[in-house]
Amino acid sequence: MVAANMSGELSGRVAIVTGGASGIGAATAALLAGHGARVVVADLQEAKDGPGRFAHHDVASEESWKSLLADLLANEGRLDIVVNNAGITGGMGNPETTTVEAWQRVQAINSEGVFLGCKYAIQGMKKTGPDKPSAKGSIVNISSIAGLIGAAGPTAYSASKGAVRLLSKSVALYCAEQKYDIRCNSVHPGGVDTPIFNPLWQAVGREQGKAFLGSRHPIGRMAEPAELGEVVLWLASDRSSFVSGAEIVADGAITSGLQRRPLLAAR
Amino acid sequence: MPRVEGKVVLVSGGASGIGAATARLVVQEGGKAVLADRDEAKGRALAAELGGAAQFVALDVTDEMAWQKAVAASVDRFGGLHGLLNAAGVGVRNSIEDCTLEEYRRVNDINALGTFLGCKAAIPAIKQSGGGSIVNISSVLGLRGASYAMAYCASKGAVRTLTKNVALYCAQMKYDIRCNSVHPGYIDTPMIAPRLDQTIDNMSGRQWLEELHPLGRLGRPEEVANMILFLLSDESSFSTGSEFVCDGGLTA
């Protein structure tokens, strides 16, 4: 068992990972569980052999957040870690082709979903008990390098990830002012080999697609989901106790230098 | 020589604040200004004052059809479109704990969706007119967070990256359309008027806001308009996808 080889650093902690059935979410859920956390994988569909407990959850629905939190507090009694990871690209729309409907759908999941995730995370993390005398926790919001630069994705996606970037800072500042010991940070991955790229794999083939995207990263390859999971694990744990409102970039150096070509072409 | 001679500029939120100040400056510098706003009375009054070089059109920025009509009206009236200023916006105070989903969506619809729809509607017309410049008003709160303006920060963060996306798309398509974001500090406009009379930390709201800025005062709409005019004019012809800060030193 993998779990037996890992420390129990997060033992006693309770975590929610949205979009936890695949990609960065699944890798994160496995790492959090491996370090002793009790993990609720919140997703629209259940993964086979996923870690932790599965909860059917739609991040864009406030009702869904309310019932997720109520169930979680009833079962676990506390909430310590929320990873707002669920997201969609919404197709390759550019500024001329993106429809209002596509825009709204992307914002509903990527921006409103993270807003609701933070709001209910704080509510849950404020719940105290014998093992938890005061409000405490860590919120990790998955933005993207598309929240930093303009060349890394479709138009509605770029806007939604820019919203997550600033939303995270506001949440961090608010929690600090309220003297909640709740930190909030954004993570900005470059290209990660996850199902979000399935349309591209289908179009050009997986190996070719990975090689193409990999070549756009100075490091020369895409990331594996577990590499991002490690970043989230660090932010979720007490090892990052002075880190709040920060943008943690894990992008194989894409945003470090000058871009000769856009990561993904328009059209 | 006038700095935007013959250029037609569509200004959302053109009836007041930064939008109105920019419209005045555009006309003063030889251009035509189309004032697009929800406030018909104010918009028509300003258009009348500016004379034949200005025109009012009614615009709700969240309505795609209304944007198309505003762009068509600009081209009909003045024969083309060379500039777009997305200045319409709402400033709302809320925190992560007290903001409702409805409020979050409303702020993001006006500030972010509204800016996107402006870009989408204007790009074909500007392209047909031989190129031009789009200026999106973000905010210092698109660069830094604020506990008391959570939804506003999110919407202005969206405008910041949207702008870069539009800039690179237009460059890639060889449209000769530049797109930049402007990040004002607190400017003395109707948007912040409700805050000036409040008491914050035993100070007047005005004093509290003034003291945030190293320059020790609020910005004037004309000061931001000067930066926007530079971006609308050909003086800024090598600037695109960038963030232009006008904040009295606030983010320094």
Image: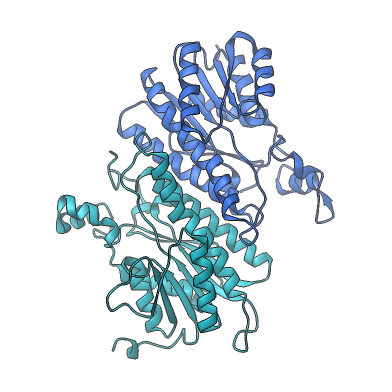
Chain colours: A cyan, B blue
Is A187 or B233 nearer to us in this picture? Answer: A187
Q: Residue furthest bottom?
A: A4
Is A31 or B43 nearer to us in this picture? Answer: B43
Quarter the N terminus of chain B occupies: top right
Q: Residue furthest right?
A: B202
Q: Position of residue B86 (x, y in %)?
A: 53, 32
**Res B236 seen here:** yes
**Res B239 seen here:** no
Is A177 or A29 nearer to us in this picture? Answer: A29
Write the residue at 64% across / 30% down: B18
Q: Position of residue A233 (x, y in %)?
A: 42, 74
Report the label total.
0
Dividing the picture into quarters, in which one does residue A109 lie? bottom left
Using residue B149 as the reference point, say whether residue B65 is left or right of it. Answer: left
Write the residue at 19% across / 55% down: A201
Q: Position of residue B159 (x, y in %)?
A: 50, 42
Dividing the picture into quarters, in which one does residue A183 lie? bottom right
Q: Position of residue B95 (x, y in %)?
A: 64, 57
Using residue A90 as the reference point, say whether residue A210 is left or right of it. Answer: left
Using residue A175 as the reference point, say whether residue B218 is left or right of it. Answer: right
Dividing the picture into quarters, in which one does residue A156 lie? top left
Q: Residue furthest top?
A: B52
Vertical side of A240 occupied by A259: above or below: above
Vertical side of A242 occupied by A195: above or below: above
Write the residue at 53% across / 29% down: B85
